[in-house]
Amino acid sequence: MTATAAEAWKHWSDGRAATVSSPHGQLALTGTHWLEPEPAEVPGLPGLWWSDAEGVRVRAAAADGIVVDGPAGVGTPVDGEVLLRPDTDPAADTATLDDLRLVPIEREGEIALRVFDPASPARSAFAGIAAYPYAPDWAVPAVFTPFEEARAPLVPNVDGRERPLPVSGRIAFTLAGEPHTLTVSRSVSGGLSGVIADATSGKDTYRFRFITLPAPDAGGLTVLDLNRAHLPPCAFADHFICPFPPPGNRFAIAVEAGEKQVLTR
């Protein structure tokens, strides 16, 4: 183990715990409210809320205290009807209500409003993320091969629905002397990500985990570091939508690396 690699992993691990437990981090999510075209109340919020092709619509009075934070007008109180564009829009909006953060999202054409509350019970009970000790053998070179055409297989999600999971190609690598492949997605920045499970899943670790890899070089070479296999958002709050691993992304071996479980007080 090199001190540099171990220290970098420790820095990443500490950063993960700080991010998910921040005032509006993943542990703060208390609701994902799917909206209908007709105005209706959202539990715990003032005003009326509905969705249309552009995003979330809200009708409220200035006295209700909802404030827009985004391109629609930073710091502008909602007084009348306002459009809040979802996270899939380059000009996405959010809003606040006292300490709450209100985040419009869009998933496969459906619009929802997420509510993040710093006083959430999950955030108050958080005691860290259990993880395996860093081990250099779990970081291996990998070669990315893109698909000729992008694919989006239907994959079950934690809420019981099947949704398309866009994937861009496969990585090939050797682990414990055996060849393996994983299906991965490619981000706009060029980095790779995937959803995996293994023989520890649902036992020593959460049901599945996410991985991220650096952008491959011109020859497709990158690094798969399973020490950085991390818990999906739904491990921290039930109101997240997370995909299960696509076919072929389940290791028969036990991947005793990366994050394991959320610790509570």
Image (cartoon, helix red, strand yellow):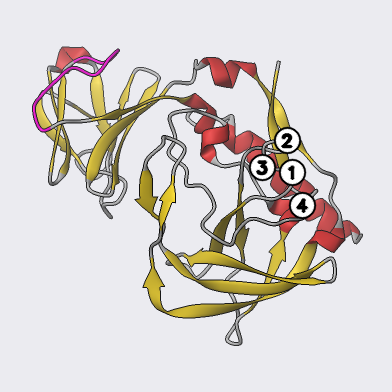
Q: Secondary structure at mark 4?
A: loop
Locate residue 213: give its quadrant.
bottom right
What residue type is disc 1 on?
Thr
Distance of label 4 from label 2 (alpha carbons): 12 Å
Q: Position of residue 256 (x, y in %)?
A: 80, 48
- The residue where tag 2 is placed is 203
Mark 4 vs mark 3, foreground winner is 4
- The residue where tag 3 is placed is 15
- The residue where tag 1 is placed is 200
Disc 1 + disc 4, Cβ < 8 Å = yes
Which region is colored magenta?
A: 37-46
What residue type is disc 4 on?
Val
Instruction: Give the class, few, some or many, for how many residues have Cα within 10 Å of label 3's Cα (few <14, many ≥20).
Output: few
Distance of label 1 from label 2 (alpha carbons): 5 Å
Instruction: Give the class, few, some or many, for how many residues have Cα within 10 Å of label 1's Cα (few <14, many ≥20).
Output: some
Q: Secondary structure at mark 3?
A: helix
| Quadrant housing the C terminus | top right
Q: Position of residue 95 (x, y in %)?
A: 29, 31
- The residue where tag 4 is placed is 255
Q: Identify the mark nearer the N-term, 4 or 2.
A: 2
Residue for point 22% across, 48% down: 109
Q: Identify the mark nearer the N-term, 4 or 3.
A: 3
As drawn, 232 above or below 122: below
Distance of label 3 from label 1 (alpha carbons): 24 Å
